[in-house]
Image: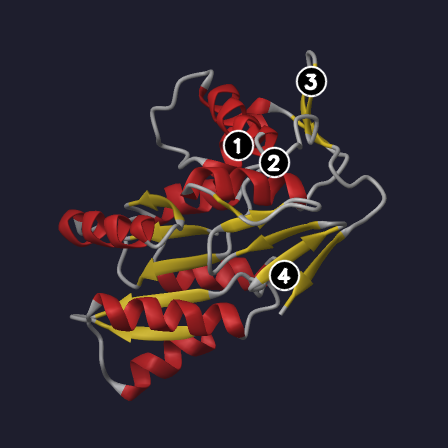
Amino acid sequence: MRILLVEDEPDLGQALTKTLSRERYIVDWVQDGQSAWGYLDQRWVNYTLAIFDWMLPGLSGLELCQKLRAGGSSLPVLILTARDQIADRVEGLDAGADDYLIKPFGMAELLARLRSLQRRSPQLVPQRLTVGDWLLDYGASTVSPPRHPPLLLTAKEFQLLEYFLKHPQQILSGEQIRAQLWPLAAESSSNVVAAQVRLLRRKLGEAGQDGAIETVYGLGYRFAGSPRHEAKPTL
């Protein structure tokens, strides 16, 4: 799950990024509205949620909401603001925000509101993802390969396998995978995807699934573990 966080207060932005990352979100944090719009226009990046501060340099959080909705986007947006009048809340919701959180707030409430947005969003994240005979369990951070007990995955292994399972039989380039699974501002090396794929393959190999992830030389990687089935969420 990927979040675009737009917050110009450095201390709050750092605290939110740390908290959200601990909850296994991939977080892109920017500090002005114009940069945020550039992030939303990235070719291979799909956000699950967005958190916009109301008052931002460049474009405000409300202007970002309006641009998103004018373009037909249904991305769930949570607005953060110190403005607590009813008229302000109405203005934020009318601009296209899905929820509104008044500063100061507790991290527990923020996380609860994000879970609520996910539940009622068309981009609802399932509790399980089934692809053929493969089962990915979000709550337990495990994968059950065909005819094998569940394997516990690290956060990055889980995100990588989820991405493969959602794109079975598609060739995914290293650039495409890195753009989707690592923060855009992260200083990741060029071989970070290859290294992570090796770790995931090693774990899957212990379950007799050595060939589940193929290397398509010169192009990228392909999940071939269940070629006759499509991804099906289980709620």
**Residue at the image point whose x is 25% and y is 69% from the top:** 108
The 10 Å Cα crowd at callout 3, few under 14, some 14 to 19, many 20 or more, is: few
Q: What's the residue type where badge 2 is placed? A: Ala
**Residue at the image point whose x is 49% and y is 65% from the top:** 76
Tell me the CA gap for discs 3 and 1: 23 Å
In the image, which disc is placed on residue 72?
4
In the image, which disc is placed on residue 83?
none
State the residue position of label 1. 203
Of tags 4 and 1, the one toward the viewer is 1
Of tags 2 and 1, the one toward the viewer is 2
Q: Is residue 211 above or below residue 101?
A: above
Q: What's the residue type where badge 4 is placed? A: Gly
Q: Are marks 2 and 1 in contact (CB under 8 Å)?
A: yes
The disc, 2 or 4, on the residue closer to the chain's N-terminal end is 4
In the image, which disc is placed on residue 207?
2
Q: Secondary structure at mark 3?
A: loop
Q: Secondary structure at mark 1?
A: helix
